[in-house]
Image (cartoon, grey):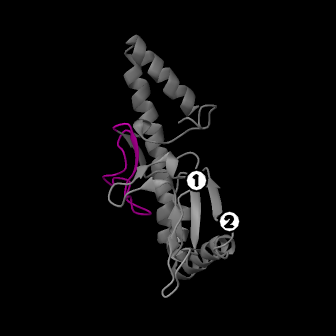
Amino acid sequence: QIRSAIQLQAGLSVMGDERATLWKTEIDNQLKCFLDSILESERSILQAEAGKKQEADDLLVSFLLSFASRTATRERLNLFTTNYDRLVEYGCDLAGLHVLDRFVGALSPIFRASRLNIDVHYNPPGIRGEPRYLEGVIRLCKIHGSIDWRWEDNELRRYAVPFGAANNHPDIPAEPSGSAMIYPNPAKDIE
């Protein structure tokens, strides 16, 4: 429905129809409610009763480690999710896992599709020869995007939105229809 509404709004805009502004406002309102609900679910995890939070954190870490704790000679864990939230990233932080998500850069990470086969190696001290794969590394693919992704200046960027941030955090877009959410559709692979 959102995909259809966005296409309708774009068509109205091309035609110069004044209803395009109303449609854009309503689409932004609906997407903002969606973003707010994701942030609320993240906050509910952070604000859970101490014992329950620790139990949930332990279960999440155990789940992720059951797949990611493999010897470095085995194929990396490839994790795919359609969720916009950052629960997987939160769990990886708790577990001390390194996430390869095709974003490059530390201060303002930019998505690079060509970075699919990047990996992390190290040279053990005192040993010469082939570098070894670092353990505790996963590849994460967020098929529909994430609440901390934004499309700006023809680049997909990831912003430092804290897990469970306030709804008015400066990196949460006021007009989310221009952000990087990728809705299910036949052209998703291109988007």
Percent across and percent down for residue 167 are: 38, 54
Q: Residues within 10 Å of mark 2 (few under 14, many from 20)?
A: few
Percent across and percent down for residue 34 are: 50, 46
Identified at 61% across, 37% down, the residue is 184
Would residue 28 be found to the left or right of residue 168 on screen?
right
Q: Residues within 10 Å of mark 1 (few under 14, many from 20)?
A: some
Magenta-span inclusion, residue 30: no
Q: Is residue 127 above or below residue 89?
A: below
Q: Is residue 28 above or below residue 118?
A: above
- The amino acid type found where label 1 is placed reads Cys
Q: Earlier in the sequence, mark 1 or mark 2?
A: 2
Residue under circle 2? Answer: 75
Mark 2: which secondary structure? loop
Classified by dominant secondary structure, the portion drawn in magenta counts as loop
Magenta-span inclusion, residue 156: yes
Residue under circle 1? Answer: 141
Q: Is residue 128 above or below residue 17?
A: below
Total numbered badges shown on the rendered structure: 2
Between disc 1 and disc 2, the foreground one is 2
Q: Nearer the viewer, residue 116 or 62?
A: 116
Would residue 25 be found to the left or right of residue 56 on screen?
left
Range of residues picked out in magenta:
153-175
